[in-house]
Amino acid sequence: MMAFSRGPVFLLLLLYLFQMSDTSLVRLNENGYEDIIIAIDPAVPEDTTIIESIKAMVTKASTYLFEATEKRFFFKNVSILIPESWKHSPQYRRPKQESYKHADIKVAPPAFEGRDEPYTRQFTECEEKAEYIHFTPDFVLGRKQNEYGDSGKVLVHEWAHLRWGVFDEYNEDQPFYSASSKKIEATRCSTGVTGMNRVHTCQGGSCITRRCRTNSTTKLYEKDCQFFPDKVQSEKSSIMFMQSIVSVTEFCKKENHNREAPTLHNEKCNLRSTWEVISSSEDFNNSIPMETPPAPPFFSLLRISERIVCLVLDVSGSMSTYDRLNRMNQAAKYFLSQIIENKSWVGMVHFSSQATIMHELIQITSDIERNKLLQTLPTNADGGTSICSGIKTAFQVFKNGEYQTDGTEILLLSDGEDSTAKVCIDEVKDSGAIVHFIALGPSADLAVTNMSILTASLQPTVNSSIFQKTTELESKGAILTNSLWLNDTVVIDSTVGKDTFFLITWSKQAPAIYLRDPKGTQINNFTMDTASKMAYLSIPGTAQVGIWTYNLEAKQNSEILTITVTSRAANSSVPPITVNAKVNTDTNTFPSPMIVYAEVLQGYTPIIGARVTATIESNSGKTEELVLLDNGAGADAFKDDGVYSRFFTAYSVNGRYSLKVRADGGTNTARRSLRHPSSRAAYIPGWVVDGEIQGNPPRPETTEATQPVLEDFSRTAAGGAFVMSNVPSDLSRDLYPPNRITDLQATLNGEEISLTWTAPGDDYDVGRVQQYIIRTNENIFDLRDNFNNSLRVDTTNLTPKEANSKETFAFKPENISEENGTYIFIAIESVDKSNLSSGPSNIAQVALFTPQAEPVPDESPRSSGVSISTIVLSVVGAVVLVCIIVSTTICILKNKRSSSGAATTF
């Protein structure tokens, strides 16, 4: 992870020492996946049977995966990351680059008590890798097998989400659909999976099963109707529908893929089957089927231990320019005084053309050790630059402390102006050490940048509990010209407040600092470090909840002031609200757009409705702001999942661009999402055995979709840097089309079809498009593959709105053939003023018929459980149902026909 800056106003970029790359380390080698990391969260109480259960799960999953992928893939080696709080064992080793941020699978408490659903954090599009898989301890320990099936098969289901970017082939929001057979079908792939559609309710130990009624509005089955699969059947697909069915061992292929079903996979992957998507992956194209089964996976057990860090500081002559030496000392002081945890071991090296050990490793137990290290910070800069000398000397510091370099960390602060740095890249890679590179100027040599990308991150608390990590509440800087004041507020909410730290820096002269707590009390006891041009304040205990107000008065014109406020969790049982920022790629070529992501969470619970803003700064100092959206349109793959996204195309120069994100929310805006994750293993409500339903316990549900966030909060985070190339000097040409519409929906209202979608922009999701082209077809594949030849709808009266607005349009379909008039399929394309097209949208469909429900024979609802002595009389419309229940259930169904002759069905 890198931070880049041209002047002190961007010191804040140097202070994000707690950010890191979270890219997976997994690689495919001769059909086997290597370097998989399964991390047990620090919040999980010690239970060594979890480790054995993980091994058993992965071993079974490897066999399932091998067969499901036609003998192509298996799990070769896996590292299990064990919390520091767990007791040491001789079989545990120290991690190298493995960390929670790199974890492919996280074993952690559920986001909500009792909800043990296995899921994959997936917020990108089809074919793109997801973030991680989340399993709860109860799931790993096999306590949820009835509800989700064998844990090994569930892992294969989730691995397909994670690695190949496929989606589920069921849909709890649309569990049934109108099939071309003119029947109501359960949403599934394949349709060869058999079962029963029933309402199955239990209360007080008594359960009743009945056939499903149809909803008069949707013409589909009622809300409580569920599909119960047969326990015993022969269908082999699909793993992305119900991997828990014993016979299911394959992914849906083109020949048995259900393209009609309203699954997320069909929507996101343009009606392609799961196997078609997997077959187009890089993994598939770089492998051939194996002739013999693979060996079982190899497991490494890695226990987190105290950190070992060496600061490697550049004192070469180039550091004496642009105030770089002072800025380096500011960053180092902040790290030593506020970021590095107690019990860590820290050393220091200075380098120019040669390197010197300034302090051997010392364990941080109090401010005494921190002050000893602070006293060794450099006071002048001179000479040449040899970054390799500094790094090799850091290796010597580790050796002197009798530590191997595996898993050690080097915090390299330098302007990076060293063309010889490439000579030690291989040595650094082979060392197992992690290099965190903070670039203090715009001219860092590419070899240094590559070394940082290859060897990891900048997160000092990479393997700490979320309750120990530093959370940034405020980060702001300004060049004060017209006004000498920097005024604002910072919110301290109840989830943070411990170890709250205010840091202020300047470039010329110390400002006047006025800070008031929520009660209006003036805080005056800042420590002034005039030599380093910084002032700081630690709030003892837990800071007051509420709005803190700061006013900074510069003493000179054109002064540069910055303020950073950090804190930690106030309560060890209440996770703090956090924001994480990232971009979709580290390197890019003009004119390809970047995608900016910001994830706002409380623990594992998404926070929706926040206001999230990204600031992107080029290495020339030009900044652009983007309001990130969680609307499920444009760059945002899923609405209301706590991930805020936006396209970025406002490139100005070649080189590095840095990202910073701010999130604000509160009582009237932000909410905790209680919805189930969008990519997860299907919960099995029960099984059909010998014609009878054997129900599972109801899945824990909440009565509301969201909970309000009961107070204001603010967070900031750095999202690293990306490098742009081939940016032309003339940027006047329009190269950016509107973004593709992905949320088109259609409903039939009488004789009209009503459409809704989110407006794209002239340039992706910015501006306003020139026109919409809407086309229909009675064949979904003709519409997908031959959009321009499909029937065009008259949109003369449709005027596009500004990007991200909600669009609506209604039309009456024409020229529908009688013999084929079962469905009409609709897609929309947007065109900008330069005649650049977005391409066709997702395909919406409307059924032009009333689907046929299952026939209802004269039979009693099945009842089981405790006998009830009562008489129930129910009259609904023209149907009279009289049930007399004594020790058994006797039901008499009188089915009266309406005047039209149609039967009303229960």
Image (cartoon, helix red, strand yellow):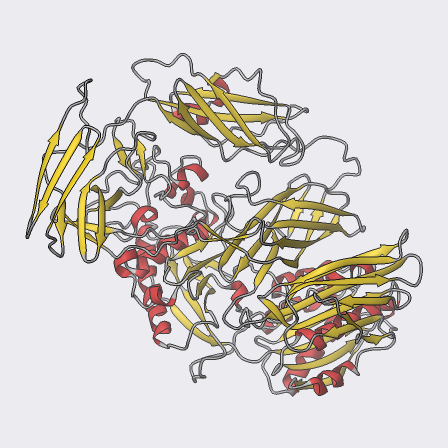
Camera-side residue: 811 or 372? 811
Question: In the rendered image, is residue 874 in sight?
Answer: yes
Residue 554 drawn at (x, y percent): 89, 62
In-front residue for pair 166/368: 368
Q: Residue at x 44, y 54 (%)?
A: 120
Name the spot of residue 503 as percent of width and height, x first. 76, 69
Estimate the x, y position of residue 427 in percent, counting from the top left. Answer: 64, 71
Please state, as top left, top right, bottom left or bottom right, where the N terminus lies in the image: bottom right
Q: Residue at x 22, y 47 (%)?
A: 200
The answer to which image quadrant residue 92 occupies is bottom left
Q: Is 166 displayed left or right of 602 in the figure?
A: left
The x, y position of residue 322, in whole percent, is 87, 62
Query: At 62% across and 44% down in the image, what residue appears?
Result: 646
As displayed, is residue 293 above or below residue 386? Answer: above
Whether 126 is drawn above or below 850: the answer is below
Residue 783 versus residue 94: which sits nearer the camera?
A: 783
Q: Is residue 332 above or below residue 486?
A: below
Task: Count all numbered tags in the image, as a single digit.
Answer: 0
